[in-house]
Image: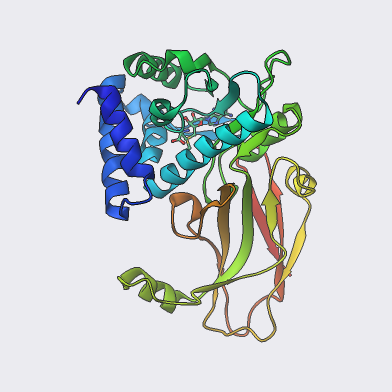
Amino acid sequence: MDDRAELKHLTEVLTGPESSAGQWFAAGATLYELFLQRSGLNEKEAGLRRDVQMPSGKALGPIWAAFCLKDAIRTRIFLTSILNAIEAARQRFPGGPVHVLYAGCGPFATLMLPLVPFLKKNSAVFTLLDVWPENVQSVKTLIDAFQAGPFVREIAVADAVQYRIDPDRPVHVLVMELLQAGLTNEAQVAALANLAPQLRPGAIVVPERISVNAGLLHPGKDMRRMTDPEGAVQDVFHLLEPGFTLTAESADWLAFTQGEERVVRLPADRDPAYNRLCLFTRLQVYGNERIETWESALTQPLPLLKLEEPPQAAGIALRYECGVTPGFRFRLL
Ligand SMILES: C[S@@+](CC[C@H](N)C(=O)[O-])C[C@H]1O[C@@H](n2cnc3c(N)ncnc32)[C@H](O)[C@@H]1O
């Protein structure tokens, strides 16, 4: 099988409705090896394993950014979503190829290259950005290796938090995954705050919606969940309201960008066994494509506090802070 045929086959397994979870993970691992070999990225190079501190968060070292591919459910759901988003944008903006801005492409352009065998000629053209010159170089090598050139407008070293979209080349789909669980450490919020106002009306953002809620976790049930092959353990956690929702256009914008505080009360009739206060992240990537709790590194609960008995607080005040170390901050009430 040639490289392009192998890329198509692996993407089919990774995104196919018939594949099992084991097949998704195996396909992700094989795709990682294929991209590693064809890009020439040196996994052992220490300089590619350090993160870079930007004013709006960390940019993962290229090796860590490459590893994101192996987060198989994440990669599967994003790829399916982006293909659907391109189709929707083609209906919405007829008359030319859909322009996709892919910010934070990493060394493998993981959220673009696997789609290339499935894109119709002239259906889409990508602008790819990353802050690491090594990533940009690696992606250029892969674009050549997989003959993806006709789908690329530009590949540039640029900071998504500062980037200006050329008004003569409006963006129809924005793809961006500068993300960790709880929107911590990386620049997703700051980059969206920069890019969303520059998008034309009707443009699609992938991921479409990121929800973060405080919640109460039952550690005993969580332990049973991890060792239960049937996945039958119920009610492992309860989400608390109000949460925060990040979309390109929601009224929640101010809450994020200006650090508005939200008060989350602990229920008075709470079962004391639910004693771990955590942040829960969920993604609506596009349409019905979602990543739920525990399905990806992006949706692992982030522990905030172990509640004592009687609890040391009636609730918490929660707010989001942009800056060098973005993330949620809380204080006890
Ligand atoms: C979590 S990795 C994701 C890599 C790849 N897109 C994927 O989904 O597998 C995030 C990538 O975004 C890049 N990045 C982080 N902050 C950035 C910024 N402000 N502007 C542009 N790229 C950024 C990092 O260098 C890294 O390659």
Identify which residue is drawn at 46% across, 29% down: 112
Residue nearer the viewer, 46 or 150? 150
- Seen in the picture, residue 7 relative to 304 is either above or below; the reply is above
Residue nearer the viewer, 323 or 283? 283
Residue 185 percent across, percent down from the top left: 56, 42
Residue 300 percent across, percent down from the top left: 47, 57
- Seen in the picture, residue 56 relative to 317 is either above or below; the reply is above
Residue 217 percent across, percent down from the top left: 52, 72
Q: For residue 11, what is the image quadrant?
A: top left
Identify which residue is drawn at 49% across, 50% down: 298
- Seen in the picture, residue 28 relative to 103 is either above or below; the reply is below
Residue nearer the viewer, 312 or 130? 130
Q: Quadrant of the C terminus?
A: bottom right
Count the marks. Answer: 0
In this image, 170 relative to 180: left or right? right
Residue 277 percent across, percent down from the top left: 57, 69
